[in-house]
Image: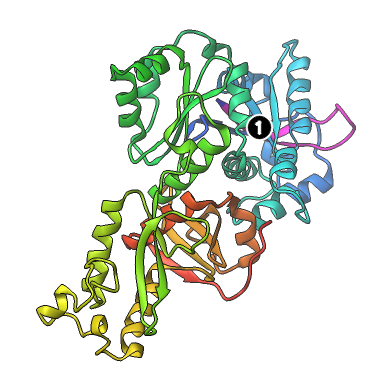
Amino acid sequence: MYAILDIETTGGKYNEEGITEIAIYQFDGHTITDQFSSLVNPERPIQPFVVNLTGINNSMLRHAPKFYEIAKRVIEITKNCILVAHNARFDYRILRTEFDRLGYNFEKETLCTIELSKKLIPNLPSYSLGKLVRSLGVPITDRHRAQGDAKATLELFKLLLNKDVSKEIITTYIKSNPKKQLQPNLLEIKESLPSKTGVYYMHRQDGTIIYIGKSKNIQKRINQHFTSETKKAKQIQSEVVAVTYEETGSDLIAQLKENQEIKRIKPKYNHALKRTVFQYQLSSFTDAYGYINLKVEKVSEQSKAITTFTNYQQAKSFMFKVTEEFQLCQKLTGLHKTQEGCFLFSIKQCKGACIQSEPVEHYNKRINKLLEKYTFNQESFLIIDKGRKVDERSVILIEKGVFKGFGFYNLNFQITNLAVLSSIINPLPSDRDTQHILHNYLRKNKMYKIIHLEEEINIS
């Protein structure tokens, strides 16, 4: 659990500042579970430059509660939480100073979103809260007021959690949280999870990830893990102490992220995706007569794949589908082995490419339409899909035919701003399995929207 904090102060000499406003959002890594905000009577004057900056003046605070009147609420909402703030050293110092004046020892672990941003999003021109969130497309209102800045910090922290591909933030939290050290009740773990699309991570006591999966309904899938009687399921049940998750909204992003996370982390109980599982590919060649032929074959580094398939039956079904869709010849698509006319020609549904009676340019024109539909070798485009909430969309970046990464943006944000797009994209490596997942998704035509890009984007 995290407590996202922002404090406004009177300004003045070091350790003599007083709090004028405080806002805290209790956050479980996915949703806000509690929140508190209040003006505070600092019992000392506010510096003029602070009044100009925040708009908070002495008369506004005359009847506000003093810190000792809200101290209990601050302790309650931050209990068992890691404090998160933009420039956490400042906010934590101010809060500890106020509690010291009351004779109470207030100690918490802290995370600083400035430090995390510099590590996870390097080389930005500014890391001040306002400029940083604007560069990332994060909405911000009531700048230099505690509630507005705390909410912006919360949205920034969500983005940083997504960019933390090594899972250092989550793993450190689980390892340091004493509540997680107890043998868990599996039912309680399941009930704490959402019925939403995303990737989930099973952790053992030291925080290590032992299994990664993806599902359109995380809670339902975890319930299957916890009620299964298989040997592997029972081993997982005996070791797991926590399940964390990342909502993706998009099933495509869940597939892509699961594929990469398993190969990178290599969890103890994952086996299937540690190796490439897409065994067949569709390739093309031009025959002696100039006709473009299609061929299903074993995956090979030597030949260029149009698209890939998990098994031969899936490939064969696809070939029958496109042969009919584009009025192709069964002989030239490998579906009918013959030295003469194909079966479709015999029933007058093939135009005769199999016996060289159809002009080469006519047949190849239809083949090229198929290639345009099912390949993106040199294209740069965005796949826009469902987000994690109603006012959000997910975005996947393909640059010159290669998957680069994904991100999320608010509907109020103009996605054609390519400079900001580079900042919100979480880079992921591309491999043959990644290409298969994308090809398979595009084949089924489930994307929300595609935006073609003329300008080259560099996110490296």
Badge 1: few (under 14), some or many (20 or more) residues near its Cα, within 10 Å? many
Is 4 within the magenta?
Answer: yes
Which residue is rendered at x = 60% and y = 51% of the image? 427
SS type, badge 1: strand
Q: Picture coordinates of residue 434 (x, y %)?
A: 48, 51
Image quadrant where residue 101 sits: top right
**Residue at the extreme left of the image, as rendered:** 347
Q: Quadrant of the C terminus?
A: bottom right
The amino acid marked with disc number 1 is Val
Using the image, determine if residue 19 lies above or below residue 425.
above
Colour convention: rainbow
At 37% across and 72% down in the image, what residue appears?
373
Q: Kindly identify which residue carries mark 1.
A: 84
Rendered position, 57 above or below 110: below
Q: Is residue 267 left or right of residue 129?
A: left
Residue 391 visible in the displayed image? no
Foreground residue among 299 and 68:
299
Q: Is residue 345 magenta?
A: no
On the image, the x and y values in percent for residue 257 come to: 49, 44
- Quick one: which residue is furthest to the right in this view? 13
At a point 33% along the width and 19% down the height, the residue shown is 226
Left or right: residue 368 versus residue 93 is: left
Query: Residue 166 sits in which quadrant?
Result: top right
Q: Relative to 109, is 297 above or below? A: below
User: Residue 117: horizontal and vertical position, in percent?
Assistant: 70, 43
- Expressed as whole percent of the image width and height from the top left, the position of residue 71 reads 64, 20
Quadrant where the N terminus lies?
Answer: top right
Q: Nearer the viewer, residue 327 or 46?
A: 327
* Horizontal relation, residue 125 to residue 345: left or right: right
Q: Which residues are magenta?
A: 2-21
Above/below status of 442 relative to 33: below
| Nearer to me, 330 or 239 | 330
